Image: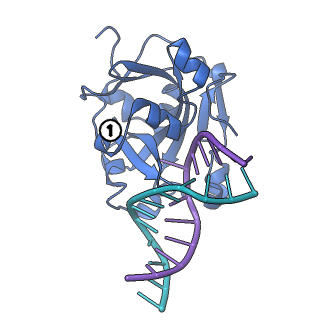
Chain colours: A blue, B purple, C cyan
Amino acid sequence: MKFPRLKRSFFIRDTLTVAKELLGKYLVRRIKVGKIVETEAYIGPGDRASHAYGGRLTKRNKTEYLIGGHIYIYLCYGMYWQLNITTERAGKHECVLIRALEPLDEKSKSKKVASGPGKLCKWMKLDKSFDGEDLTKSKRIWLEDRGFKLKSSQIQAAKRIGIDYAGSWAKKPWRFYLKGNPFVSRK
DNA sequence: GTACAGATTGAG
DNA sequence: TCAATCTGTACT
């Protein structure tokens, strides 16, 4: 492997820090690679927008409770998968939603195949079989640091998307993306 | 067991 | 603006 994989120590830090520093990192799915350009932080159990709000633990979200560096993936609206990466320590049920990737090859770029959480998973062929996958050990998928230098001035914070039901939590600026990047999701 | 809403998307 | 389509939650 040419580039260093992100280690456990990267993921077990504060969720907002991880959400920001994931920007510019590369998600590698065997031959497919994309640079992360948009993320959102979900911080249970206080966060009403989180599936772990109030300490809820269901068959669907149990992987969200794993130690940082694991995949929590779930089906939304019955058709679209949402890729999350757990953070912090086991039992902390906090995670980062990966919302958009910038593909490496020009053909995929022109189609914006990963500009949205549902599209991203469809492109990378991610589904339930990846639930609970360990990104620090898996041979199918992992995260790499390819030397992209992230400057704080490039990080744009904004309200999270699609969670208006969460009241004041919906206003938290916990969505982060690379300023001016054309591959962030619409809206 | 039934009803309903959701961390979305692409077509109209 | 709307429907597609499945899982968890709150009812009966």
Query: Residue B8 in the image: x percent, y percent?
Result: 57, 45
Who is closer to the viewer here, A177 or A107? Answer: A107
Query: Which of the 4 quarters of the picture holds residue A136?
Result: top left
What residue type is disc 1 on?
His
Q: Residue at x 35, y 18 (%)?
A: A31
Viewed as shown, does residue A72 lie left or right of A129? right
Residue closer to the observer: A154 or A128: A128
- Specify the quadrant of the image occupied by residue A12: top left
Kindly tell me whether residue A51 is visible in this rendering. no
- Give the vertical position of A77 relative to A11 (above or below): below
Q: Chain of mark 1?
A: A
Instruction: Kindly tell me whether residue A69 is visible in this rendering.
Output: yes
The image shows residue A3 at horizontal and vertical percentages of 35, 11
Q: Report how many numbered discs are placed on residues in the image.
A: 1
Quadrant of the rendered structure where residue A85 is? Answer: top left
Which quadrant does the C terminus of chain A fall into? top right
